[in-house]
Amino acid sequence: MHARKKAILYYTDCMQRVMCLILLVLSLSCTRQERSRVAICAMFKNEAPWLKEWIDYHRIVLGIDHFYLYNNDSTDHYKEVLRSLIDEGFVELIDWSSSDPKHELSGAFMDAPWSGAQLGAYNDCLKNRALGKMTWVAMIDVDEFIVPTSGVDSFYELLRKAEKKNKATVCLSWRVFGTSNVEDLKQGELLTERLTWRSSDEYGWNRHVKSLHRPEYVSFALVHIAESLSPNFGSKTLSADDVRLHHYWTRTERFCSERRKQSKEIDPQFFDNLHKIEDKTILQYLPALKKQECHR
């Protein structure tokens, strides 16, 4: 009789655990379904060493649903990095050469030779790929990370409020980081973990923004903002106290020297300006990212 009672108690305990697990899964599922569907659109060239961390952070931590990645004449091993993500359906890879006139659009802020192709990619994404599929599309680069200051749910709540207030575009302010005196990353090290020093909030570059757009209500997107919105729809710049865009423009010292043609020896004042504040905001998200990576 005693053994039977123990078996009943054990069975009851197991059933309670199973029910709690089911309720938790259903709760998480409902929460995710209530979120806006968010994609990222980016044009890249020879970014293979940096793609994985950038995608993993936004996919695993931030819960981004899809990536529209426009390859701009890369010659490195980007396909090898992206292959499994393409197969799983997270990444849509589009070849987008600057040498093809059909890929270029003219517009404001044409301050770089690739801007025409970038404008073409962004607007192709909005009107030919994300329209009717995604609620928001973030137009950012592979060296830019969306960082909510108070948890991921707060980011989606800000988007939900923007939708209710008929905002077609929300803008995120840059916070530009320096090299943190890191010469290079070792195998397995994260850029976002090693680079923790950035410019002050008042630094000139931090006046720049990048945007998330709602495809149905943006007629034309520029590199940083939207140029034309549907009637009765507006834009809003979100407070950097709530969410910001960490911009790792220099990356490591080696990268900055070789790719940006900049160094502390060439322009010490520039590098000093990028090392004014130690900012560890993003570190709160990295344990979840590392844990997920260990199980893959």
Image (cartoon, rainbow, N blue to C red):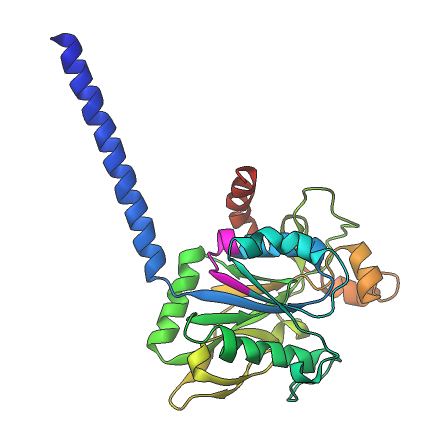
Q: Position of residue 284 (x, y in %)?
A: 52, 48
The residue sitting at the left extreme is 1
Q: Which residue is depicted at the point 62% across and 81% down?
A: 120
Of 280 and 186, which appears nearest the observer?
186
Q: Position of residue 140 (x, y in %)?
A: 59, 69
Residue 113, above or below 86: below
Residue 180, above or below 232: above
The residue sitting at the front extreme is 87
Quick one: quadrant of the N terminus? top left
The reply to whether residue 105 is visible in this rendering is: yes
Q: Quadrant of residue 152?
A: bottom left
Q: Quadrant of residue 107?
A: bottom right
Describe residue 157's horizontal placement relative to residue 85 as left or right.
left
Q: Where is residue 105 in the image (x, y as percent from the top left)?
A: 64, 86
Of 258 and 128, which appears nearest the observer?
128
Q: Which residue is depicted at the point 62% across and 53% down?
A: 83
The residue sitting at the right extreme is 265
The reply to whether residue 280 is visible in this rendering is: no
Q: Does the magenta stretch include residue 203?
A: no
Q: Which residue is depicted at the point 88% across and 65% down?
A: 266
What's the magenta region? Answer: 59-67
Residue 190, above or below 12: below
Describe residue 279's horizontal placement relative to residue 25 as left or right.
right
